[in-house]
Amino acid sequence: KQEVTQIPAALSVPEGENLVLNCSFTDSAIYNLQWFRQDPGKGLTSLLLIQSSQREQTSGRLNASLDKSSGRSTLYIAASQPGDSATYLCAVGDSWGKLQFGAGTQVVVTP
Amino acid sequence: GAVVSQHPSRVICKSGTSVKIECRSLDFQATTMFWYRQFPKQSLMLMATSNEGSKATYEQGVEKDKFLINHASLTLSTLTVTSAHPEDSSFYICSADRTGGVSEKLFFGSGTQLSVL
């Protein structure tokens, strides 16, 4: 059974620092991997989607890497801002569209 | 971008009542929708896969008679929590697959916080 783990569970950094969020999964037979942002009491916003054949995706200050063989993905957020404060979720997807989520990393960026 | 609307955003109900949650894809057709549940400080867990025009597929441990799913059209799926109890209090969220079954970017609703007294 696929298990998705996110480390650290919580992270607090001063504004301007780079953020590094880690995600690991136990079964490398994934279809894709997505990173989401969740604000308190709200839905999810998809940040980046990496297909299993890809090694990374970039969008603005965000960069996500995928090493399928070792079961790892890392989300980098450059030059963090207070508006980046949220919970970041990693999810691995199968070909049917089902997602297996990690528990998330709660990020606080202090001004 | 694609929009998924979920209503209501918050429900408080008495134990024993039923609650219906709607999930609508506003600008695309979704043959497949997914329902997730999230308990405090835990990850989202898939409850069921909703397929338009057919029965939903439930994950292991999810009671299909308690969590009724109806996907009557290509833009609407509903989740009804029947005879809700306090242990059903949770954050429920839906997602829609725009591409009709092949896993691409999924679009999520804003979620429903259910509190059962």
Image (cartoon, grey):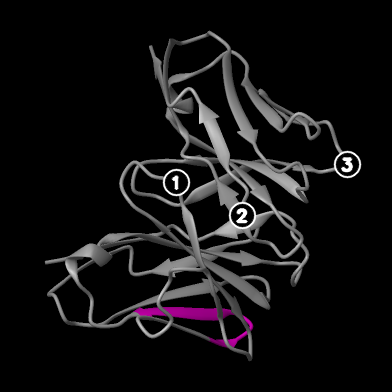
Q: Nearer the viewer, residue A88 or A15?
A: A88
Query: Going 86% across and 37% down the picture, which residue do you hit?
Result: A54
- Local SS, label 3: loop
Give the amino acid at mark 1.
Answer: Ser
Q: CA distance from mark 3 to mark 1?
A: 26 Å
| B64 lies above or below A76 | below
Of all residues, the one furthest to the front in this rendering is A1
| Range shown magenta | B71-80
Q: In whole angstroms, how far apart are the C-alphas of marks 2 and 1?
A: 11 Å
Left or right of residue A108: residue B49: right
Residue at the (61%, 66%) spot, across then down: B96
Instruction: Looking at the image, tell me whether mark 3 or mark 2 is earlier in sequence order.
Output: 3
Q: Which residue is mark 2?
A: A99
Asked if A47 appears above or below B31 in the picture, the reply is above
Residue that lies at the very extreme toward the right in this rendered image:
A53
Please give the chain letter of the residue carrying mark 2. A
Tell me residue A77's x, y (percent): 61, 21
Checking the image for residue A53, the label placed there is 3
Q: Which residue is mark 1?
A: B43
Q: Are marks 3 and 2 in contact (CB under 8 Å)?
A: no
Query: Could you say which is closer to the camera, residue A87 or residue B87?
Result: B87
Tell whether label 1 touches label 2 (CB within 8 Å).
no
Q: Position of residue B54 (x, y in %)?
A: 62, 90
Q: Are marks 2 and 1 on the same chain?
A: no
Q: Estimate how packed mark 3 is, as few (under 14), some (14 to 19) or many (20 or more) residues with alpha carbons within 10 Å.
A: few
The three-letter code of the residue at mark 3 reads Ser
Element marked by disc 1: loop
